[in-house]
Amino acid sequence: MRATMTISLPKWLKQKLDQITRKEHMNRSDIVREALRQYLVKQEFRRLRNLTIPEAEKRGLYTDEDIFREVS
């Protein structure tokens, strides 16, 4: 089920959105939906990362290389 909502954008942002809709052959809703989905995924990743950092640091894992070395 979908819900309709109204948002306001600065004129320059609406113009950019309209440019992208023409270039990508997508409608505004599809682009805004995808942008929001990506934003929410990034926020969830950051939340989970922030939960795991203290435990990783306790184990001496500070960099990607440390983690790769640990799992290899």
Image (cartoon, rainbow, N blue to C red):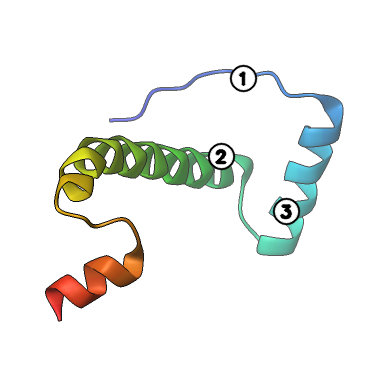
Report if the CB atoms under discs 1 and 2 are less than 8 Å apart: yes
Residue 7 is marked as: 1
Report if the CB atoms under discs 2 and 3 are less than 8 Å apart: no
**Secondary structure at numbered mark 3:** helix
Q: Amino acid at mark 1?
A: Ile
Q: Residues within 10 Å of mark 1 (few under 14, many from 20)?
A: few
Is 35 displayed left or right of 7 in the figure? left
Give the x, y percent position of residue 37: 41, 42
Give the x, y percent position of residue 22: 75, 57
- Residue 34, above or below 6: below
Q: Which of the 4 image quadrants contains residue 49?
A: top left
Give the x, y percent position of residue 59: 14, 53
Q: Which residue is mark 2?
A: 32
Q: Residue at x 30, y 35 (%)?
A: 47
Q: Amino acid at mark 2?
A: Val
Q: Earlier in the sequence, mark 2 or mark 3?
A: 3
Q: Residue at x 79, y 44 (%)?
A: 16
Residue 20 is marked as: 3
Q: Residues within 10 Å of mark 3 (few under 14, many from 20)?
A: some
Quadrant showing the C terminus:
bottom left
Query: Which residue is nearer to you in this view: 13 or 70?
Result: 70
**Secondary structure at numbered mark 2:** helix
Q: Amino acid at mark 3?
A: Ile
Query: Which residue is nearer to you in this view: 71 or 1?
Result: 71
